[in-house]
Structure formats: structure tokens, C-alpha cells
Amino acid sequence: MRFIRYFLVIWTFFFVYTSFSYLWGQNGLHARRHLETERVRLNENLQKLENINIDYQNIRNNLMGDQDSLSVYARQLGYGREGEEYIRIMGLGIAINTDMPTGKVNYTENPDFISDTTIKIISLLFAVVVLSFLLVYDFCTNAFSSQSRN
């Protein structure tokens, strides 16, 4: 009977180790949830970049085929047609009116998790606590049983 109780120490170690690894380990639920949110965020950014690319391709196609679009864009850049004269105010530079977003750089973050060594140490501490509890229990039961015999 005593052997079965001390088997509880080994079982406690494995149970705590398995539970912590499953919940907060490197491949645990917490880390997977973090990676899933990162994947969703990166997919949203990729979709935004694809939309920007489509807009730029539309502008490129308009500039290649439509003379009026080309002249409007050239005027935004500060170019003019033959025979036009400009009065340019110095120091202001060229006003480029582009309403196109350029996108942003997204950096992935490493998921937070508890290292395997830390989980083993925590599991070992739980097992030592259970072992010490069982040893104290056995000591107390042996001490009281020997006193009742006398």
C-alpha cells in the first residue's frame, strides 16, 4: 500500500509536466493562439498590399494607354506641355498629390511560452512537495501508532 502512495509522486511529476507543456509550453495552447493571431494579422496585411498593388497596376495601365491621365499625372509632377509657361515660386518644391498608401512593414513577434527546463523544475518541485507530505504523514502515523502501543 505504501508503494502505491509513493507512486503518486512520480504520477504528480508527469501530470504537472504534461499539463504545463500542453497549456504554456513551446507548442502549447497559449503559443498556438499567439501564432494564430499573428497569422491572421499577416494575412490582413497581405490583403491590403494586394489591394495597393491592384491600384498601382490600374494607374500604370491608365498611364500607358490614356493620354489624358498621363497629362494629369505629369502636371502633378510639375511638367507641362509645349508652349506653356510657368511662374515657379522657389523653395516650395514639387507638390506630388498621391493618395495611394504605401503599406507598412509588419514584424512577427515571438510567442511567449515557458521553457521546457522551467516546466521540469516546476514539476519536480510539485513532486517534492507531494513526497514531503507523504513522508510527514508516514512519520506522524508511525509515531502515533507506536505511542498508542505503549
Image (cartoon, rainbow, N blue to C red):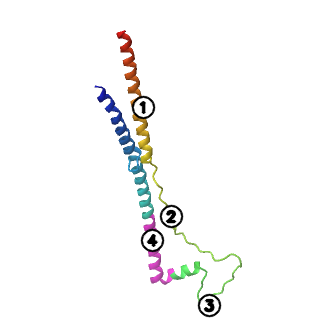
In 3D space, how far apart are the residues under numbered discs 2 and 3 (Cα atoms)?
A: 44 Å
Residue 13 % position (x, y): 37, 38
Q: Nearer the viewer, mark 4 or mark 1?
A: 1
Q: Nearer the viewer, mark 2 or mark 3?
A: 2
Residue nearest the viewer, comparing 135 with 56 = 135
Mark 4 neighbour density, 10 Å: few (under 14) some (14–19) many (20 or more): some
In 3D space, how far apart are the residues under numbered discs 1 and 3 (Cα atoms)?
A: 93 Å
Q: Earlier in the sequence, mark 4 or mark 2?
A: 4
Magenta run includes residue 76: no
Q: Secondary structure at mark 2?
A: loop
User: Mark 1 sits on what residue?
Assistant: 129
Residue type for callout 4: Asn
Which numbered tag is attached to residue 105? 2
In 3D space, how far apart are the residues under numbered discs 4 and 2 (Cα atoms)?
A: 15 Å
Q: Earlier in the sequence, mark 2 or mark 3?
A: 3
Residue type for callout 2: Val
In 3D space, how far apart are the residues under numbered discs 4 and 1 (Cα atoms)?
A: 61 Å
